Image (spheres, rainbow, N blue to C red):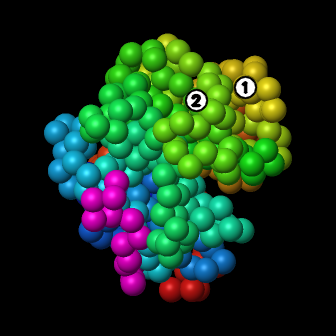
Amino acid sequence: MDILIYLDILGNKIVFTDKNNYETLFEIKDAGAADGIQVDEANGKIYWTDMGRYHEGEVFPKNDGAVWKADIDGKNKTLLVGNGDMYTGKQLCLDHEAQVLYFCDREGGRVLSCKTDGSNFKTLVSRGKRDSLPVDILDQCVGITLDKKRKSILWTQKGPSKGGLGAIYRCGMVTNSDDPEKRNDIEVLRDKLPEPIDLYFDTDCDTLYWTDRGKEPEGNSLNKAKLDDEGLSNHQVIATGFKETIGLERDEDNLYIADLSGALYKFSLQTGTLTKEHQTAGMITGVAVTNSKVLALK
């Protein structure tokens, strides 16, 4: 049995479902305002980011965000990053081989990392003015993915809502600079996007996928582009019609997309067909797919 996991920020829970019929298998309660999620199948662990408790609408202006770790069934919940160390945890990426987590801190304007035990917490990229936090909305980092082939980190800065000022950036996974505010290897891969959010990089075909919750017709969309040493090319909007698109995940044949209306969608990579698979009563942010073997580790 294949499993789809989604984060419901309205219910503050992580929901495990049968990917064939979306019946709920079990839930992890008290997950906070969860946004990004990763599953470590080999070790039976789950990781997620928390945007924090205090918010003013969609703005999270306090440094009460977190990164959490738990067993696949939610037991042994452990705080990896928090206690004032970050503002707003957004998309999360796991380097399985190195056992390192990479994640964005939106209102903090940073790209961060730590080991899967919470050690070696680092600021890799720092945007905006550190003496004026939260940072300006143009400097807020949201989505993240890794291109290990080129030893690169890619992230989004979505810009103002429906503002058409979003961008996708790239830098090295390793830097010679001791100051994350003064890196000289940051590239703008694409700018003036409607409002890019989450990223997924398919290393086998060098294709970057991303969601965008910006203004239509280019926004509220699923996008793809080719990625190489020179940057992004052949950008295509491959699906539209979402309602505040956020989460993005892939299995062998499909992309899975979530939006804040509580809907889950499937995009076939073979046929290019988008189908609405399930409607929840919540507000969905991050999604992940795994298989029933992880449940044996409960």
Q: Which mark is residue 199?
A: none
The amino acid type of the residue labelled 2 equals: Ile
Labels 2 & 1 near each other (Cβ < 8 A): yes
Query: Does the magenta-highlighted stretch encompass residue 39?
Result: no
Give the residue displayed 34% in from the left and 54% down from the top: 86
Give the residue displayed 33% in from the left and 28% down from the top: 136
Give the residue displayed 53% in from the left and 25% down from the top: 167
Q: Of residues 167 and 129, which is closer to you in this image?
A: 129
Query: Does the magenta-highlighted stretch encompass residue 75?
Result: yes
Judged left or right of residue 203, residue 53 is left
List x then y, in percent, for residue 181. 49, 38
List x then y, in percent, for residue 192. 52, 15
Q: Of residues 2 and 294, which is closer to you in this image?
A: 294
Residue identifier under label 2: 168
Q: Which residues are magenta?
A: 74-86
List x then y, in percent, for residue 152. 70, 44
- Quarter placement of the N terminus: bottom right
Q: Is residue 91 above or below residue 119?
A: above
Q: Main secondary structure of the magenta part?
A: loop
SS state under label 1: strand
Quarter of the image where one finds residue 226: top right
Judged left or right of residue 78, residue 104 is right
